[in-house]
Image: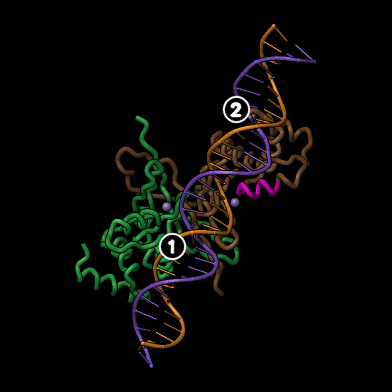
Chain colours: A green, B brown, C purple, D orange
DNA sequence: GACACAGTTTAGAATCATTCTAAACTGAGT
DNA sequence: ACTCAGTTTAGAATGATTCTAAACTGTGTC
């Protein structure tokens, strides 16, 4: 599923972010940056990349996800105490979280209006606002 | 700092929640339910209770915090992937989170207005909305 | 009061996502 | 080809949390 055109696009993506392109990084980028937004854990990415042609170690998966995050290609979403999600949607937005299956769904930023937020404590400034709407199966 | 009056109040609190009162549970309740709202980790509670007269094992701290949570005396706040916070404020409200020192500050529910929230995915209903305002030290 | 028995507590082992370590590998530039 | 920083990796280490299985406690029964 990775034609030369795709490959060049991914390499350009990494270079634009100041990241040297390697076989492993391109393989991970191919999984992450396929044009659709995703919420993935390190384990999921590791499992996905293992199915493909290029094996990548779990340590490299973690290293690379963090590097992409620092470079602004991914965002970390903290939503559950037992796992970290990486989000390929780096724009401002919020989340539904379904605890039953551990899945995240995006909520557009303009679907949530926050007003009357009090000022932050002294010496601190607002970095980002995360809205998490936790879901539960309907009873009926 | 625990006079008989306090002790009776704590026992009544536990009994009202359907929890049998034991030496350990009362010692933990004394730390948690002193009339002020707190955000604490299991380790913090364990350290605090160890300073007092009644040693309590870490396993019991975890057991009891979860039991109090199930009984509605505490709320779990997931905000950092490396630790779980227990909140003695069980009413609807939101949080500032200061990553630098790991501290939480309450934001009253009526300080945040959420409008135009999209409907949840089919078969799911909204359980709760958590707003986390992440803080950073001011640069200047 | 001894007896029974469920409920509770506990030390220490186990778990598991994540991070660390230290050695091998790779690749761009000379 | 040679070098050197940057990268990858297996496996060990970490650390919060959970589990296990044995000891303990409290309350009710005879
Ligand atoms: Mn995971
Ligand atoms: Mn902790
Ligand atoms: Zn998202
Ligand atoms: Zn709170």
| Residue B46 within the segment the image draws in magenta | yes
Q: Chain of mark 2?
A: B
Secondary structure of the residue carrying tag 2 is loop
> Which one is in front, A84 or A55?
A55
In the rendered structure, find residue B18 and report the number of the disc placed on it.
2
Q: Residue at x 32, y 57 (%)?
A: A50
* Image position, residue B68 (x, y; %): 59, 36
Q: Pick the quarter of the image with the N terminus of chain A.
A: bottom left
Left or right for B21, reference B71:
right
* Image position, residue D30 (x, y; %): 69, 6
Look at the numbered discs 1 and 2 and tell me whether their residues touch, using CB distance below 8 Å.
no
Q: Are marks 1 and 2 on the same chain?
A: no
Left or right for B51, reference A108:
right
In the rendered structure, find residue B116 and report the number of the disc placed on it.
none
* Image position, residue A122 (x, y; %): 60, 64
Q: Pick the quarter of the image with the C terminus of chain A.
A: top left
Q: Residues within 10 Å of mark 1 (few under 14, many from 20)?
A: few
Q: The magenta stretch spans which residues? A: B40-48
Quadrant for residue A42, please give it: bottom left
- Using the image, determine if residue D4 lies above or below residue A6: below
Quadrant for residue B119, please give it: top left
> Which one is in front, C25 or B43?
C25
In the rendered structure, find residue A59 and report the number of the disc placed on it.
1
Quadrant for residue B28, please give it: top right
Q: Residue at x 77, y 39 (%)?
A: B2
Q: Residue at x 74, y 35 (%)?
A: B6
């Amino acid at each position: 599923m990775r034609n030369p055109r795709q490959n060049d696009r991914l390499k350009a993506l990494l270079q634009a972010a100041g990241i040297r392109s390697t076989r492993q990084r391109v393989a991970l980028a191919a999984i992450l940056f396929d044009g659709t937004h995703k919420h993935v854990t390190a384990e999921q990415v590791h499992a996905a990349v293992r199915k493909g042609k290029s094996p990548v170690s779990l340590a490299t998966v973690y290293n690379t996800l963090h590097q992409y995050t620092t470079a602004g290609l991914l965002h970390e979403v903290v939503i559950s105490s037992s796992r970290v999600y990486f989000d390929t949607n780096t724009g401002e937005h919020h989340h539904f979280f379904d605890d039953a299956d551990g899945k995240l769904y995006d909520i557009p930023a303009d679907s949530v209006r926050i007003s009357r937020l009090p000022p932050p404590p002294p010496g601190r400034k607002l970095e980002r606002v995360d809205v998490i709407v936790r879901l539960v199966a309907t009873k009926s």
